[in-house]
Image (cartoon, coloured by chain):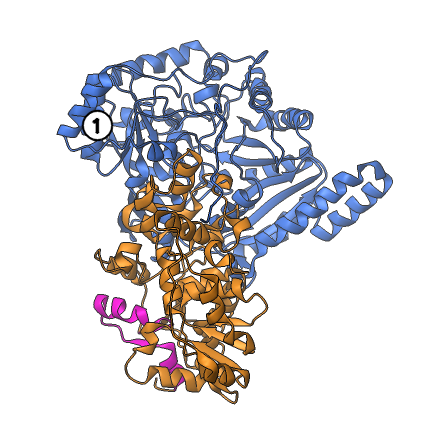
Chain colours: A blue, B orange
Amino acid sequence: MDSITIGTLPSCPVGADALLAIKRQRTNPARWNAPSWEMFATAAGVHDIELIDANAARGAFVTDAGGTAYGLPHAIVIARSAEQISTLLRLAQHYRVPVTVRGGGLTTEGESVAFGGVLLDMTGMSQVVQIDRKALTVRSQAGIFWHSLAEELRREGLDYLSAPLNMTSTVGGTLGVGGIDVNSARLGCSADQALALQVVTPTGDIVECSDTSNAHIFERVILGYGQFGVITEATLRVRPYTPLRMHYFYYASLRAAIEDLQMLNRNDASDYSGILTIMDCAVNLLVAFDSVERETAFIAQWKRRLRGHGEAGFVLRAAIQYALRPWRLGQALYLYRRKRELFPQFRRPEYMREGAMQDRSVVFSRAVWKFWGSRQMVIPDLATSAEKFVAAVERGNAVCRTYFPYYTLYCVGIKLRAEHRPHYEMSCIPPDADGWAYGCEFEPIMHDVVYSRDHLQSFKNAIYDIGVDMGASYYRFGGMMKGYIRRALGDALVDRHLAMKRAADPAMILNRDVIF
Amino acid sequence: MFALANTASAAAIDHAACSGCSLCLLVCPVWRTTHDLRLTPHGRAKALQHGANARDIAISVESCTVCGACEPVCPENIGLVAAVVALRRQLHSTDHVELTGQDAGDDLLQDLRDTHTVLVLDAALRQSTGNILSRVTAALAEKRTMCISKDDGADIALALECGQPISPRRIERFVSPLRHAKKIIVVDGLLYRYLQLWLPRARIVSLGEALSTIPAVRRALRRTDLYVIEPRAYHANYERLVTHYDELGAETSCSFNLDLQRIAIAATARSLPQFLGTAATDNDVHVNWILKGRTVNRIVIENEGDRAAFETACRIPVVHLGDIAGGAY
């Protein structure tokens, strides 16, 4: 008989580590296991809500992209309509059954892991409802992957404004946390692109909301970590599709690259910008444009002010540097190997036309998963004001060096919109940021090395501690790191939101282990 | 030697490597019609990681259309097609059923020894009307000697699709005459995938690649054509063929049934029950998605089996690549 390799989880993927000496307020929450489940399940059946409780099906949702939090729901519900979700949440309120909402499952702190109760799989609602070419808007169900949305828009010659560089994040999940793109320094975070939402409140009301209608719900649901409702549909701004004209500049100094990035952002000198590094040895400032005109203006006015080098210049300088420091040959070989493997992926001919990159989300997302992906995506981050950013990145970089031989930093700016201030409260946007916020993700490259959960968790804590110390915020609040939200943003603010949460969600059933 | 017949690239089958990225969902025709994670490669891998066996996920295993779209996008390089074939085999008897196939016989063996190119047909092209087959063979032969293999391996393709074990003897009988050919053109996409494994040193090309390489065909393709790539062969040799079709597109400006990841959208994606005729097909969903938002004057198909799906869904003329090669259009 043929056999295939069937992967196995360790007997207890959670309990192996002692987690000693790590400053945290909470670890995995206890599994909810109340007797009301049976009554809830019966009532759900009466209302034609399918509860999928087969072990094989639940196993598909046992963890998230972070791979450090594990939990099983009692059952899965595949989202099919706002009405279905409304009924589900009414029953869940009545029987006090927790409901955890999951989009692409790309959380890293267990936010989309259900520790008992219902896991609501939003990807079942993945249809585009309407594209309005004149108004340049799209109405879509919230469980749609950004990539699927891009596919639909492209058939109309359109594109979304900004979305995470990960094709399998969902629209609803992104609007709940922020979403950053390499054009966020110009267009804001993905959540800023939302014009209106259909939301099912924790008590089951189906509400249409925007900045002008039910604004109090809109403000809380946008960037709200799923606490105040389930986003079922979203109206987003879109734009005509354009390919990208890319430029890369290489730096040996993080500080110089960040300063140049911020200079470009302040002067609106590019349409896209971001920093991607291999450790702090090869710091790549990416600059890109939607049009030849913008590219020409950049070349004429700004390019010469950048302190970065072209690829050839960087290679030459690096060769000289490593020749003078032969004890760092291993690092040099790693850089060379990484460059040889990674760079061609950004220039695959099928994605290039006349020097312009088509489908940037595909190119970047495939590279992200191929070169950074694994069963444990460890990506702690810091979000600060522009003024604090260099120091935050340098401190985070020092932490990375302590914990891992190889890692990547990814930095982007986020243009803040004054009229969206209410959305930003208690979110990844740091309270003291004005004009732009800046975010940096610190991602170890683990290859096949197995690190203990203790090691990974203490690394993340060390990064998050910098945020507390500097008055920063984080993109990945929630789940296992939720203790940080009080330390970073203060009791007064958190308690005010907790009171709003209790009013909106009396049984505290919706995504209850994420923030509060 | 043909243990490979049943497991394909054994080293590549490893559900444990699945990181749950969901990239496979984006290209999966079953996901497109169901939006049910359980029925996708991601869902199967995670279920297996969680201790499920083939029977626990039988519906999912049988729902796969074996189009292979998931393989090129998998960042872990998991052999997802071979995995499904192996899982299907676990659902069925472990005993070999002796497949008879077409007996090639010594006559054909002699023919092939003198032949440059062998064409391995599938049922759809063999049964096609309107002289398509003769046009195809005329275009492919050019100045070379070419013959059609009497043994088209249809029973092997069916067994692979169903997860039926295949005896090494039957495979040897099928591939042995092909070893003498300098070039093997295979119409069936699943057979194409496995022939690459069984005859690693042979020059094997899909019918679509063979025809679309002919200069006259390339010249006859128009900007307003929708060129429908046969997905199984395309995904089985993605890294090479993505370049081939990218160049074809640059040269002719025709559009393709490709998504943003340059993965082919199958027009006739069939689960095992659909393949066996025990469930209704949902080709209209896939065809409508391929056509959505496109302005097309002509649909050019590589796979004759796609014709009915397009002709049912739209009134745009459908022509086989062989028709173009034969100068009929």
Q: Is residue B323 magenta?
A: yes
Tell me where residue A333 appears, x and y as whole percent: 75, 44
Q: Is residue A134 above or below residue A439?
A: below
**Image quadrant for the C terminus of chain A?**
top left
- The amino acid type of the residue labelled 1 equals Leu
- Asked whether residue A127 is in view, the answer is no
Q: Residue at x 33, y 35 (%)?
A: A57
Q: Please, which residue is most extreme toward the bottom here?
A: B143
Relative depth, front residue between B4 and B316: B4
Q: Quadrant of residue B327?
A: bottom left
Instruction: Locate residue B182 relative to residue B147 in the image: left or right.
Output: right
- Asked whether residue B29 is in view, the answer is yes
Q: Residue at x 24, y 58 (%)?
A: B281
Chain letter, disc 1 residue: A
The residues colored magenta run B298-326
Q: Quadrant of residue A496?
A: top left
Instruction: Locate residue A405 relative to residue B39 in the image: left or right.
Output: right
Q: Secondary structure at mark 1?
A: helix
At label 1, counting other C-alpha atoms closer than 10 Å, the crowd grade (few under 14, some 14-19, many 20 or more) is: many
- For mark 1, what is the residue? A88
Q: Is residue A221 above or below residue B229?
A: above
Relative depth, front residue between A117 and B58: B58
Q: Is residue A60 magenta?
A: no
Tell me where residue A358 appears, x and y as whole percent: 49, 56
Tell me where residue A80 appears, x and y as whole percent: 23, 39
Instruction: Locate residue A332 relative to residue A423 in the image: left or right.
Output: right
Q: Residue at x 13, y 28 (%)?
A: A46
